[in-house]
């Protein structure tokens, strides 16, 4: 009997060992599959310009917008072909030899205007706004673009610019040849990795994922809301209290036919590529959208002046004081153009 028991235990132990080995092999296979899937997702993300901005011109693009909306999207090949001008000037980015001029190969902005807006007579005081990957924006007087060889550089001293070296598109000014531009456009106006060019300001338009898009007339038909407070946009706004007028985000969603329920989330996106990063979305809680006057601002000041592109318009996102703890500067989006309710 004792011998039988020993044999039984030995058989059971062997079976357990086989089961354990099989389980470990299965877990190892699952781990390998998960690791392979993660590598594939990481490789895919590295090719996604929303999460990993391209380093070189061949993968870059420039969106050109006019007063009526988008007119062109130029890829890297087209941009390189358009870069037939030259600006030789001292550059604020040359730290070792600051007084030695740099030779930039550029796309002259005037040539873009002539190509995409032929025969247009621009109003006095019109502005071109250059938007960068990270949301930085630089306004330039259209008159100056016509009078001076201001350009988007693609190469410096014969070498194509990389994103790590201010490129692939770098807004440059001919400071050496035209020193009167130095005060008008100081070093801080030299914009890195430009992605969009806005000539004037297009009418407001909001894309609502899963609902109806709202144009200017649809937005202005909604109840008007007003916030008076210091704004938290990065550039070009007064330091004190500002009167912002627009429509509540909740009203815009209702008008678009999107029913927002409590416990959901709302993603807001601006035109800047960094504001559309799926790995770092700007998420608003539905309770805050439903209960707080989160504003789609369309105008500002006592005169209700439409928000121009040079200030991040035509639509910006603003929050009441009560939500300052929940949403910091990162959420005060400019060039707001898309919202999406997460089911």
Image: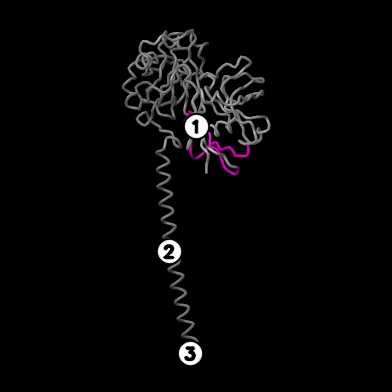
Label 2: element kind: helix
Q: Position of residue 195 (x, y in %)?
A: 43, 26
Q: In this view, does 5 lie above or below 161?
A: below
Number of numbered labels in the structure image? 3
Residue 338 is tagged as 1
Which residue is pictured at 43% across the width and 41% down the height? 45
| Cα gap from disc 1 to disc 3, whole angstroms | 77 Å
Which span of residues is magenta-colored? 262-288
Residue 298 within the magenta-colored segment of the rendering? no
Q: Is residue 139 left or right of residue 292?
A: left
Residue 283 within the magenta-colored segment of the rendering? yes
Q: Which of pointers 2 and 3 lies earlier in the amino acid sequence?
A: 3
Which residue is pictured at 40% across the width and 52% down the height? 36
Asked if the residues shown at circle 2 and circle 3 are in contact, with their CB atoms under 8 angstroms apart, the answer is: no
Residue 161 is tagged as none
**Residue under circle 3?**
3
Q: Position of residue 32 (x, y in %)?
A: 41, 56
Label 3: element kind: helix
* Mark 3 surroundings: few (<14), some (14-19) or many (≥20) residues within 10 A: few
Q: Which of pointers 2 and 1 lies earlier in the amino acid sequence?
A: 2
**Residue under circle 2?**
26
Asked if the residues shown at circle 2 and circle 1 are in contact, with their CB atoms under 8 angstroms apart, the answer is: no
Q: Is residue 247 above or below residue 175?
A: below
């Amino acid at each position: 009997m004792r011998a039988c028991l020993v044999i039984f235990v030995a058989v059971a132990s062997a079976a357990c060992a086989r089961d354990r080995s099989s389980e470990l092999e299965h877990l190892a296979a699952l781990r390998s599959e998960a690791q392979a899937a993660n590598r594939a997702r990481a490789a895919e993300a590295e090719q996604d310009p929303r999460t990993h901005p391209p380093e070189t011109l061949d993968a870059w693009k420039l969106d050109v917008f006019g007063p009526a909306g988008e007119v062109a999207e130029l890829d890297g090949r087209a941009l390189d072909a358009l870069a037939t001008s030259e600006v030789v000037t001292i550059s604020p980015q040359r730290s070792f030899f600051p007084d030695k001029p740099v030779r930039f190969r550029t796309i002259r902005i005037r040539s873009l205007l002539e190509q995409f807006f032929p025969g247009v007579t621009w109003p006095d005081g019109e502005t071109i706004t250059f938007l960068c990957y990270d949301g930085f924006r630089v306004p330039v007087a259209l008159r100056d673009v016509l009078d001076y060889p201001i350009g988007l550089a693609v190469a410096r001293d014969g070498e194509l610019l990389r994103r790590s070296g201010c490129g692939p598109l770098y807004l440059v000014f001919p400071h050496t040849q035209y020193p009167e531009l130095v005060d008008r456009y100081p070093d801080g106006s030299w914009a890195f990795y430009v992605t969009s060019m806005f000539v004037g300001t297009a009418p407001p338009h909001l894309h609502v994922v899963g609902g109806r898009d709202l144009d200017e007339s649809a937005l202005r038909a909604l109840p008007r809301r007003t916030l008076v407070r210091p704004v938290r946009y990065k550039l070009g706004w007064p330091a004190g209290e500002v009167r912002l007028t627009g429509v509540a985000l909740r009203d815009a969603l209702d008008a678009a036919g999107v029913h927002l329920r409590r416990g959901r989330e709302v993603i807001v996106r601006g035109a800047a590529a960094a504001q559309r990063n799926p790995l770092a979305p700007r998420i608003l809680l539905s309770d805050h959208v439903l209960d707080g006057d989160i504003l789609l601002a369309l105008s500002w000041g006592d005169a209700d002046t439409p928000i121009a592109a040079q200030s991040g318009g035509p639509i910006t996102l603003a929050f009441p004081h009560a939500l300052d703890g929940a949403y910091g500067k990162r959420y005060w989006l400019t060039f707001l153009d898309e919202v999406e309710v997460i089911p």
